[in-house]
Amino acid sequence: MHTHLCHHAVGVPMDLARRAVELGLTEIGISEHNPMPSDDFDDWRMYASKLGEYLDAIDAARQAYPQLRIRAGLEVDYLPGYETWIQDLAGRHDWDYFIGSVHYVEGGWDIDNPKRLGEWRSRRAFDVWRQYFDRLTAAASSGLFQTIGHPDLPKKFCFVPAEDCTPLFDTFLHAAAQHGVAIEINTAGLRKECKEMYPAPNFLRLARKRGVRLTFGSDAHQPGEVAMNFTDALQLARDCGYDETVRFEKRAVTALPLNGRVDAP
Ligand code: FE
Ligand code: ZN
């Protein structure tokens, strides 16, 4: 979940926690878009100078809602060449988890940015998907992340290749299984043009078959989106054969059975 610090979300951790308690959740995780070495890298992430404010805001929410476990993480962009920077970030706090996400493909294009939608029309969809999954596989193999965000993000604006992408998914999922990295069901896809959670059911069934662990994310960019469509997400997980999920504390993973109920909207 995100906060105002990334410049395109609304609310502070206190607001997210309040909403979570209203919904009866017992644990949430906050994972702001990571800072880059230079604040002008793009216009949709936290500045490095705000890390302290971010962590203080999470602590304030923990104090106000002691009945709620609040995990502190980052959603970290994986780009080749930034491994040292990501390790630097990892060393700045005792984080509960890092979500590894790929938004950028070759040419410095963030494929999910609505302002750069036109790029999709100048490239072959399959080339974009292949580049994306090459990077996602490298992210899963990097040892830098506990879980991988919105794993089939390139479908966001419905630029889906005619070619079969299953081999791309499978290469990534093998790497995730081998390195013990989880993937998430991210319900934000339902709120985008693709109108489908990330990842697609076929992808998730394959993930289950390969033994890849699962987390749940709303990718909330405002308090009203906390745990949005989690009932559907839980159903999707079960339909695809999952009977457990995982949680993270100080980057250690624990499995827990999917026997709970979530009555969020
Ligand atoms: Fe993301
Ligand atoms: Zn965002």
Image (tube, rainbow, N blue to C red):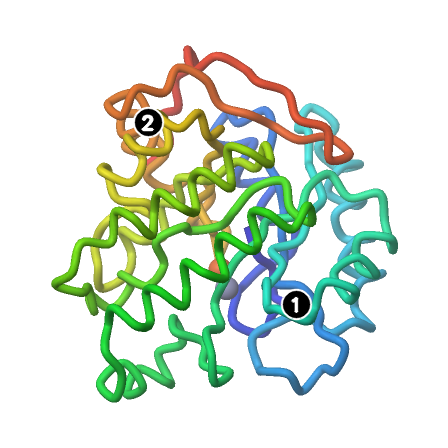
The residue lying furthest to the left in this view is 162
Label 1 neighbourhood size at 10 Å, few (<14), some (14-19), many (20+)? many
**In what quadrant of the picture does the C terminus appear?**
top left
Going by the image, does 149 lie left or right of 210?
Answer: right
Front-most of residues 194 and 30 = 194
Going by the image, does 190 lie left or right of 60?
Answer: left
Front-most of residues 122 and 32 = 122
Where disc 2 sits, the SS reads helix
Where disc 1 sits, the SS reads helix
Q: Quadrant of residue 34?
A: bottom right
Vertical comparison of 80 with 42: above or below = above
**Which residue is the site of mark 1?**
5
- Residue drawn at x 71%, y 32% is 65
Q: Quadrant of residue 121?
A: bottom left
Going by the image, does 176 lie left or right of 243?
Answer: right
**Which residue is the site of mark 2?**
237
- Residue drawn at x 68%, y 71% is 81
Residue 24: percent from left, percent from top: 50, 25
**Residue 15: assigned label:** none
Front-most of residues 226 and 121 = 121
Label 2 neighbourhood size at 10 Å, few (<14), some (14-19), many (20+)? many
Q: Is residue 90 visible?
A: yes
Q: Please, what is the three-letter code of the amino acid marked with disc 1? A: Leu
Q: Please, what is the three-letter code of the amino acid marked with disc 2? A: Ala
Vertical comparison of 76 with 175: above or below = below
- Residue drawn at x 79%, y 45% is 60
Residue 82: percent from left, percent from top: 70, 69
Residue 181: percent from left, percent from top: 57, 37
